[in-house]
Amino acid sequence: MKIGELAQVAQCTVETIRYYEKEGLLPMPDRTVANYRNYGQSHVERLHFIRNCRALDMTHAEIRSLLGMMEGPARDCRAINQLLDEHIKHVDVRISELLQLQSQLVMLRELCQSERSIDACGILHGLAAMETAAKPPRPTHLG
């Protein structure tokens, strides 16, 4: 199948497919005599796997590791469990960060309980007066 057909089957864009090829996540397909990419069922399955991993917010490095582990199907899955445990920790950190962000936004929202003129808006004054704290190092896979 051609790249447009693969994109339709996998419900993604042609650009996404090309990007995953460039990143080495999706193997380059064979070419037809007319030099068109010729994808097979293995590309469909791998693209679905990649997209499912991305839906779980896994990084390309994590996906690449999982794909590499799939190459040795006889090994035990301890490394896969470890990778997922680490990813769960990253998600926990992100949830904590988002809860802190939510708290800050709620506090800002409470600064302006009624409709006022823009120059008297408590939210804008709060944003202007808020101290910008240095970001602590982020121990997540997101950087």
Image (cartoon, helix red, strand yellow):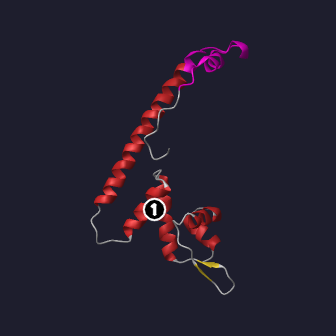
- Give how far across and how far down residue 139 sits, in percent: 43, 41
| As drawn, 119 above or below 51 | above
Q: Position of residue 26 (x, y in %)?
A: 53, 68
On the rendered structure, is 138 left or right of 122?
left
Residue 98: x percent and y percent? 48, 34
Chain part drawn in magenta: 108-133
Question: Residue 119 lies in magenta, yes or no?
Answer: yes
Q: How many marks?
A: 1
Q: Quadrant of residue 89?
A: top left
Say which residue appears at 36% left-offset and 53% top-offset.
84
Please name whichever residue, 61 or 124, is drawn nearer the observer in this view of the structure. 61
Going by the image, does 92 lie left or right of 75?
Answer: right
Q: Is residue 42 above or below residue 91?
A: below
Queried whether the magenta region covers residue 139, the answer comes back as no
Q: Among all residues in the image, which is located at the extreme bottom?
A: 33
| Quadrant of the image occupied by residue 122 | top right
Provide the secondary structure element on which disc 1 rests. Answer: helix
Which amino acid type corresponds to the residue marked 1 in the rendered image? Arg
Question: What residue would you read off at disc 1?
Answer: 64
Which residue is at the front of the view, 12 or 95? 95
Residue 42 image offset from top left, x and y in percent: 48, 75
Q: Is residue 105 left or right of residue 63?
A: right
Q: Residues within 10 Å of mark 1 (few under 14, many from 20)?
A: some
Left or right of residue 77: residue 34: right
Residue visible at 38% across and 68% down in the picture: 70
Q: Quadrant of the N terminus?
A: bottom right
